[in-house]
Image (spheres, helix red, strand yellow):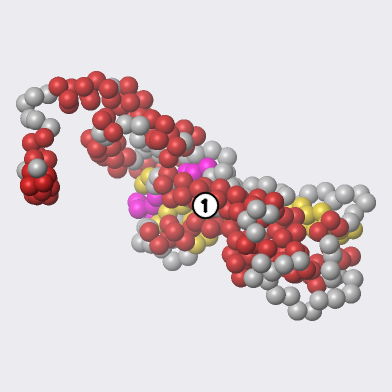
Amino acid sequence: MFTVDVEDFNHWRQQARELLKRNVPPDNIAWQYAGQYSLAFSETSNTMLALPVINKELTLPREFFRLAKTVACFRDDSIWALLYSIAWRLLFEDRRLLEFTLDKQVARLLAMRKTIARDMHKMEAFVRFKRIDETTLKERPELAENTHDLPQGTNDLSEYYVAWFEPEHLIVPLKTSFFIKRFNNMRWSILTPDICAHWDTQQLTYTKGINRSPTIEDDLENLWLEYYKNIFNPARLKVKAMQSEMPKKYWANLPEAALIKDLTRSAQTKTDTMITDNSRPAWEKTAKSSFIQREQKKLREKR
């Protein structure tokens, strides 16, 4: 039994290549994150390198590497063993293995990818940047303990933005390119418990994660809350659908979440008022639509 340490996906890929070259079966490997204690009866990966190379040339489908890079973000130590087992089967059983979606291992891998994709979508939707300036730091000294996570040399914070997010999986490195593209001219930091990403409009850097969200107040947030209240349509409220797209676990980090309880509580009353308000018939605007008028004319002609 070989114990193989893994730091990240690229490290796993290097280790897996050496194992596959030496025809080491999946059942003979115990994968673990670097730094964990090895099993007493196991051998290290250094011992593995002493084995003779049997397969000098290894060719795996590109689709596998694309899938593996995404799924490697899944927060489960067993992912490395699963990836190696599938790589082994692609090489020595069937190169079309990924097409067999009913296969237990393939189905599990695809389910993980779906979970990761949903988590990345939530990160896009629920990251909220707040502006930090020097005045805020002076008035709220408790923020100073979090500024050590900002890139070195960031002295002028007049236009620096910070966001806090708690992803389910280790997706931050995969999603930073999205935020760089969308907020390219803005200096920002995305802080998470796992890792913090920092962009200074030129370079992306990472630092270790922090335990809790910094407390920051932003004038733009007040404008956003006012806008959110005004666009809320009580007649279209569907609580279950809303919670499906915006799960409650994210509410603590969303400024608009503080309004949801009051808005939903008064939704039925406001809807009833809209229905019973005769000052402006609901059909008034719709009746003036040229499309509606044409469709009405067609219906009359068919009679």
Q: Farthest bottom residue? A: 56
- Is residue 155 depicted above or below 193 in this figure? below
- Is residue 203 depicted above or below 27 in this figure? below
> Considering depth in this image, is 84 or 298 the residue closer to the camera?
298
Quarter in which the C terminus is drawn: top left
Q: Which residue is drawn at 43% across and 40% down?
A: 245
Residue 249 percent coordinates (x, y): 50, 34
Q: Can residue 219 be seen in this view?
A: no
Q: Which residue is drawn at 50% across and 48% down?
A: 118
Q: Which residue is drawn at 50% across and 62% down?
A: 204
- Tag 1 secondary structure: helix
Q: Can residue 275 be seen in this view?
A: yes
Residue position for label 1: 117
Q: Residue at x 50, y 39 (%)?
A: 213
> Considering depth in this image, is 270 or 284 the residue closer to the camera?
284
Look at the image and give the residue range highlighted in magenta: 155-166
Q: Farthest front residue? A: 303
| Callout count | 1
Please rate how many residues cluster around mark 1, counting C-alpha atoms within 10 Å: few if below 14, some from 14 to 19, many from 20.
some
Quarter assignment of residue 13: bottom right
